Amino acid sequence: MECCNKRRMMKESPESNFMNRRGSSCFPDEVLERVIGMLKSRKDRSSVSLVCKEWYNAERWSRRNVFIGNCYSVSPEILTRRFPNIRSVTLKGKPRFSDFNLVPANWGADIHFWLVVFAEKYPFLEELRLKRMTVSDESLKFLARSFPNFKAISLQNCDGFSTDGLAAIAADCKNLTELDIQENVIDDKNDNWLTCFPESFTSLEVLNFSILHNDVNFDALEKLVTRCKSLKTLKLNKSITLEQLQRLLFRAPQLCELGTGSFSQELTTQQYSELESAFSNCKNLNTLSGLWVVTPQYLPVLYPACANLTFLNFSYAPLDSDDIAKLLVHCANIRRLWVVDTIEDKGLEAVGTHCPLLEELRVFPADPFAEGDARGVTDSGFIAVSQGCRNLHYVLYFCRHMTNAAVATVVQNCPDFTHFRLCIMNPGQPDYRTSEPMDEAFGAVVKTCSKLQRLAISGLLTDLTFEYIGKYAKNLETLSVAFAGSSDWGMQCVLEGCPKLRKLEIRDCPFGNAALLSGLEKYESMRSLWMSDCKVTMNGCRLLAKEMPRLNVEVIKEDGSDDSQAERVYVYRSVAGPRRDAPPFVLTL
């Protein structure tokens, strides 16, 4: 801002003539663009673009990466006009609740129309990272043909494509460095897609096909791994045996991230020794995942590689408490840990004992639909982790019951939480020791954790929880709510009290039109609102759309639904207007 003040002082002076001819900036365009180009934060770059016209243009021309949290918030034409030199695009599609089958098939979020525009405006595109988008084989083939310098593709929670699309990427993307396919619905047609990489191809740095179910062509995989000397990440599917894993590790000891195949093959003494030696030679390994099917007696082969590990992802490995305890003894540097609740509280006690540097913990349910007194983790395991891992700031914790006192103890031990996602799997479950609502638990979270950005709440909750959130959660950006609340007042407290709220996800709550309409002044500053199976009506949605014409208000109406009720509502800001590809069951108001 000091430079802008100097410009005003020089306005009438002869010395300013040159400045006036070339524009009002006191820096050459190239210098300004280079300085702004060094900014990595999206928020910082957005702030810079608002300073003045020169800075806006400099930020516009120097931008190389763009993140779009909702593919319908902007059109590809608007994006390409705003940023002409983009090399990397990250794009999200369907609402997050699509992960829970709450969004019908064929809802939208197709990438193809974007690719057609990018082919004309961004022929120099190098990276594409998609989440919850629909991606067809035709789109992948079009991408492979249209961008000669294309280097990286990441598909997460996407659908619509098969291994034929992967084959096109392998065959035609000559400079590919990253092929990352995770958590997708994919038609695994055959094992020949790996053979489509040219024999001269050597540039791959990241290869993740862990989601594929069928066998892959191992000979082609081994040759590819051998050729690609810069390969740093390799995540395999469950078809890869321990013997094959040993051969791959021998070819690629430089790996930093490894996702193993199945861990259950019968090994001879010599094979066991060779596998242990292969792990010993992986001096740079910092991330380990996979272990799709585990035979505990082979886990010790991992021990030599554990000292440098910072991330263990065992979300598909149902280890028991003894197995995880024996492994964690060797993992003193772990910062991130994903496990299944089969480790039980005893396993979490081992986490608290052996992982003092832990920052992120995710505990997933082995069987989320189990009834009765299913085994898993409880409040005592949660407390044990918090007592030993005081750096913990991210937790996702699935359990069947919890207490107010336990949650209060956890956040007292770890007050720096930025992400707190507690999922009590039995809807409406009270404090199992006192039978009281869980209001005070989440009250403790928002009162204690001033840095909190993301919160997921569950259990028996009244409006008091939402009053606490509105009063104390001033940095909250994302709130997920299920089976909670007493009245419209709860949602109103959140909308009125959380100034930084960007995403609000609600299902099966008693919130109606009054709650929905209480956010009229809030929704344009948010990315999105999702409400399903609440008490919102079509008339309430129509009134919202009328009062806020710059919002897209969509209602999903399937056959047999009540014409007056809005069972699933999706509200989001958009500079592109109503979307052009809405299917018949999506009503845009």
Image: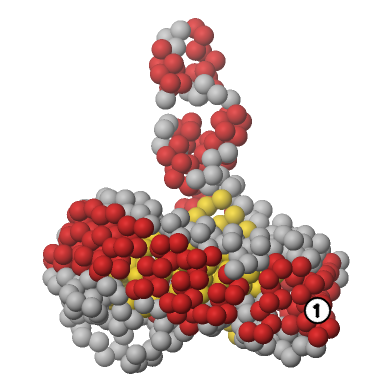
- Quadrant in which the N terminus is drawn: top left
The amino acid beneath tag 1 is Ser
* Residue drawn at point x = 16 percent, y = 67 percent: 463
* Residue drawn at point x = 43 percent, y = 56 percent: 390
User: x and y percent of residue 497 in the render?
Assistant: 21, 53
Corner quadrant of residue 571: bottom left
User: x and y percent of residue 313 in the render?
Assistant: 56, 71
Q: Secondary structure at mark 1?
A: helix
Determine whether 384 is above or below 5 in the image: below
Pointer 1 local density, CA inside 10 Å: few below 14, some 14–19, many at least 20: few
* Residue drawn at point x = 36 percent, y = 73 percent: 380
In-front residue for pair 21/307: 307
Corner quadrant of residue 564: bottom left
Corner quadrant of residue 129: bottom right
- Quadrant in which the C terminus is drawn: bottom left
Locate residue 115 relative to residue 284 in the image: left or right.
left
Tell me which colouring the rendered structure shows.
Answer: secondary structure
Determine whether 302 is above or below 307 in the image: below
Locate residue 199 relative to residue 386 in the image: left or right.
right
**Residue picked out by circle 1:** 273
* Residue drawn at point x = 56 percent, y = 57 percent: 89
Q: Is residue 311 visible?
A: yes
Residue lying furthest top? 14
Q: Is residue 162 visible?
A: no
User: x and y percent of residue 344 in the render?
Assistant: 45, 80
